[in-house]
Amino acid sequence: MIVQNEIVQKKIRIILLVLFAAVFVFHFLVLIRIIPYTIVWGGRLQNLEQMYIFEVVSIVLNSFFLFVILMEGRWIRGYFSTSVLKGILWGMIVLFSWNTFGNLNALNSFESLVFTPITFLIALLCFLLV
């Protein structure tokens, strides 16, 4: 683990939980059409059917990420070994790093300005936990 201080680790986990919960709520609001789907997924979604598929996948993944952080912090029963959790964290680092570059190339400037720093921060914080 890069960060050895348990207090700092706990703060990192709390920040990640807050970020994942906020992203979950955001995508739920997109799913129920309170927030327009044109500002997500790089502005490339063509219709409601695509939006529903992408948003459900996003909500499922963000729920999984929440549980990974809860398990990694031992706040809930672990269903994966420590090494599997570390592997998942590495996968999250890759995914959110890739997502950061995708956000930089979004057709919508809102997505670039708001979500690029968030995905970068998530990738960085996950890196600090491995």
Image (spheres, helix red, strand yellow):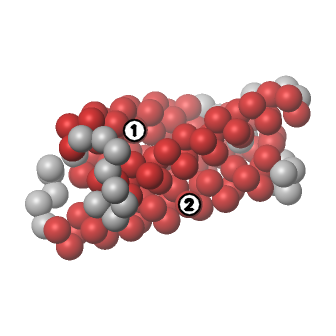
Q: Mark 2 points at which residue?
A: 21
- Report the residue at 21% width, 44% height from top: 82
Q: Which residue lies furthest to the bottom in this view?
A: 7
Q: Earlier in the sequence, mark 2 or mark 1?
A: 2
Q: Is residue 116 visible?
A: no
- Report the residue at 54% width, 47% height from top: 62
| In the displayed structure image, the side of residue 111 where residue 123 appears, left or right | left
Q: Find out whether the residues at labels 2 and 1 contact each other: C-beta distance under 8 Å.
A: no
Q: Residue 73, percent across and down?
A: 29, 60
- Report the residue at 79% width, 36% height from top: 52
Identify residue type, mark 2. Ala
Distance from label 2 to label 1 (Cα)? 16 Å
Q: Residue 109, percent across and down?
A: 69, 45
Q: In which quarter of the image is residue 50?
A: top right
SS class, disc 2: helix
- Report the residue at 59% width, 61% height from top: 22
| In the displayed structure image, the side of residue 47 where residue 79 appears, left or right | left
Q: Residue 65, percent across and down?
A: 46, 47
SS class, disc 1: helix
Q: Residue furthest left?
A: 4
For disc 2, the neighbor class at 10 Å (few under 14, some 14 to 19, many from 20) is some
Using the image, tell me which numbered label, if any, was put on residue 92: 1
Q: Quadrant of residue 25?
A: bottom right
Q: Residue 43, percent across and down?
A: 75, 34
Identify residue type, mark 1. Met
Q: In which quarter of the image is the C terminus?
A: top left
For disc 1, the neighbor class at 10 Å (few under 14, some 14 to 19, many from 20) is some
